[in-house]
Image (cartoon, rainbow, N blue to C red):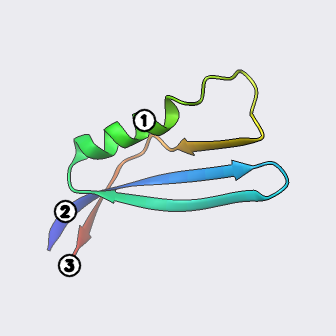
Amino acid sequence: MAIKYQIQVVESERGWGREYWQEVFDTYDEAKARIKEINSKNTSIRAPDYYMQADDTIEAIEVK
C-alpha cells in the first residue's frame, strides 16, 4: 500500500448548483500547491456566478 494525499474541491455555478470531487496527489506538497492554485483565483469580495474552491484540509489516504 502507498500513501497519497487527497483534497476536496467544489465547483459552483449560479443556476446549476454545486459539484464536489476529490483530487489525489503523490506528495503533500503537490496537494498544497493545487489548493493554492485553485484558491488564488478567488479574489472577488463577492461570490461570482462561477467559481472553484479547494478545502484547506489535506487527507492522507492509503491506496493499493
Q: Could you say which is closer to the camera, residue 63 or residue 50?
A: 50
- Quadrant (top left/top right/bottom left/bottom right) for the C terminus: bottom left
Which residue lies under the disc numbered 2? 3
Describe the element under mark 2 as helix, strand or loop: strand
Which residue lies under the disc numbered 1? 37
Q: Which of marks 2 and 1 is in front?
A: 1
Q: How many labels does the image show?
A: 3
In the rendered structure, which amino acid carries the disc numbered 3? Lys
Residue 44: x and y, percent? 68, 23
Which residue lies under the disc numbered 3? 64
At x 57%, y 42%, the residue is 53
Residue 30: x and y, percent? 26, 44
At x 38%, y 42%, the residue is 34
Question: Which residue extends farthest left?
Answer: 1
Residue 52: x and y, percent? 59, 44
Q: How far apart are marks 2 and 1 (CA)?
A: 22 Å
Question: Which residue extends farthest right?
Answer: 15
Say whether residue 53 is left or right of residue 3. right
Position of residue 56 relative to residue 22, above or below, is: above
Position of residue 12 relative to residue 21, above or below, is: above
Question: Which residue extends farthest bottom?
Answer: 64
Q: Could you say which is closer to the camera, residue 32 or residue 43?
A: 43
Position of residue 61 relative to residue 43, above or below, is: below
Q: Which of marks 3 and 1 is in front?
A: 1
Residue 41: x and y, percent? 55, 30
In terms of image quadrants, where is residue 62? bottom left
At x 33%, y 37%, the residue is 33
**Marks 3 and 1, the one that precedes in the sequence:** 1
In the rendered structure, which amino acid carries the disc numbered 2? Ile
Describe the element under mark 3 as helix, strand or loop: loop
Q: Distance between the residues labelled 2 and 3?
A: 9 Å
